[in-house]
Amino acid sequence: MKRVFLSPPHMGGNELKYIKEVFDSNYIAPVGKFLDRFENSIKDYTKAKNVLAVCSGTAAIHLAFRVCGVKEGDKVLASTFTFIGSVAPILYQKAIPIFIDSDESWNIDPNLVEDAIKKEKPKALILTHLYGQSAKIEEISYLCKKYGVVLIEDAAESLGAKYKEKYTGTFGDFGIYSFNGNKIITTSGGGALVAKSKKDIDRAKKLSTQAREDAIWYEHSEYGYNYRLSNVLAAIGVGQMEVLDERIKKKREIFGWYRKFLNDLDVEFMPEIKNSFGNRWLTTLIFNGLDPFKIIQKLSQKNIESRPLWKPMHMQPLFKDAKVYDRGVSKNLFEKGICLPSGTALNKEDVKRVANTIKEEIV
């Protein structure tokens, strides 16, 4: 039986042509016309004011922290129900992570955010738009402005998702996207930082290129990073951006197929909050009264890749001493939930095969 992957890359058609142009030009470096084109395509699509393409979404978050001044001893609030890349840069800066639980939307709970802001006086909040679904970004943006907290949106999984017709990643002071191999579009590895302020993006660009000063020799008055995206990978990104809307449409179609094929089971799919439009990067759901880990094992036996939902950061050994504002929501989701194969090359019969395998385990 053919392997069904969770969320594999899916090329659009023009990527090889663009890569050939890069090779023909010999701009095999973190500079070149496709890097500019890729940044402009993100800007045009999301309506973000300023965009910087970098080597990963994690690097983009790290740059946001450096630019906004997060330093040793500062407190940073973060979604606990997320991937480690969202919060590892807090540790890079020797800051103090404080984790916030989810609410019924599965995304970060605004009420807990306000409680934490009042008590902790944080420098920043890194908010994750989980599995391609918008968090309650309007409420959270209001709180951050009210209390003077820097808002960084981790939209790594939610490129193309919207709240009230505005794209995730563009509400906060900073936003980040990921183009890792499993994302809705990919450059194999890559990311982008977006910012409202050109001054901030210029600062991030300097830091991303080893913080070199404007001199003919290599002059450095501070340290930076080798975080810039290459022109080769940017060429892949240009081709991928051309098919982003198609990919979102297919992801949402796959979600609809799963909902139809599993509608007779006692399951709950990740909700889409009012006034939002998710990209449905992964179809995710929880099983009531069933062990999702047994279902994952059964699917694996049939050559189908699936995964648990994110294990909350406050439950990770790395963060065993971290403070958390917790109501047990994300822990419950982790213990009951599963991510199903959602690659955009899947057809209806592939999805039916996955659904039938789940039903076999339940029966």
Image (cartoon, rainbow, N blue to C red):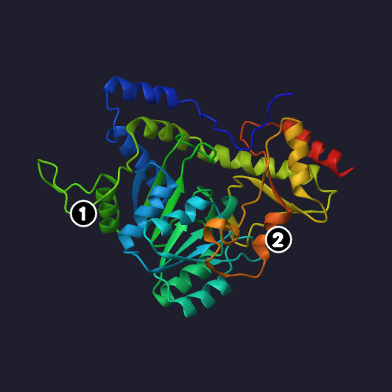
Give residue 167's position: percent from left, percent from top. Answer: 48, 54
The quadrant of the picture occupied by the N terminus is: top right
The residue type indicated by label 2 comes to Asn
Q: Nearer the viewer, residue 152 or 222?
A: 222
For label 2, the SS is helix
Up-down relation of residue 286 to residue 236 (above or below) = below
Q: Is residue 30 above or below residue 322?
A: above
Q: Residue at x 86, y 38 (%)?
A: 360
Front residue of 140 and 224: 224
Residue 246 sits in quarter: top right
Q: Residue furthest left?
A: 216
User: Is there CB contact under 8 Å for labels 2 and 1?
Assistant: no
Residue, disc 1: 222
Please give left or right for residue 302 compared with residue 41 in the image: right
Numbered label attached to residue 121: none
Is 269 placed left or right of 246 in the picture? right
Q: Real-space Cα distance between discs 2 and 1?
A: 44 Å
Residue receiving disc 2? 332
The answer to whether one can see residue 156 in this image is: yes
* Outermost residue to the bottom: 118
The picture quadrant where one finds residue 149 is bottom left
Q: Could you tell me which residue is drawn at 57 percent across and 42 percent down?
A: 248
The picture places residue 230, in percent across and down from the top left corner, at 34, 34
Q: Crowding near pointer 1: few (<14 within 10 Å), some, many (20+)?
A: few
Sequence order check: which comes first, mark 2 or mark 1?
Answer: 1
Secondary structure found at label 1 = loop
**Quick one: 194 or 339, which is closer to the camera?**
339
Q: Is residue 68 above or below residue 261?
A: below
Q: Residue at x 57, y 54 (%)?
A: 130
Q: Quadrant location of the C terminus?
A: top right
Asked whether the viewer can see residue 48, the reply is no
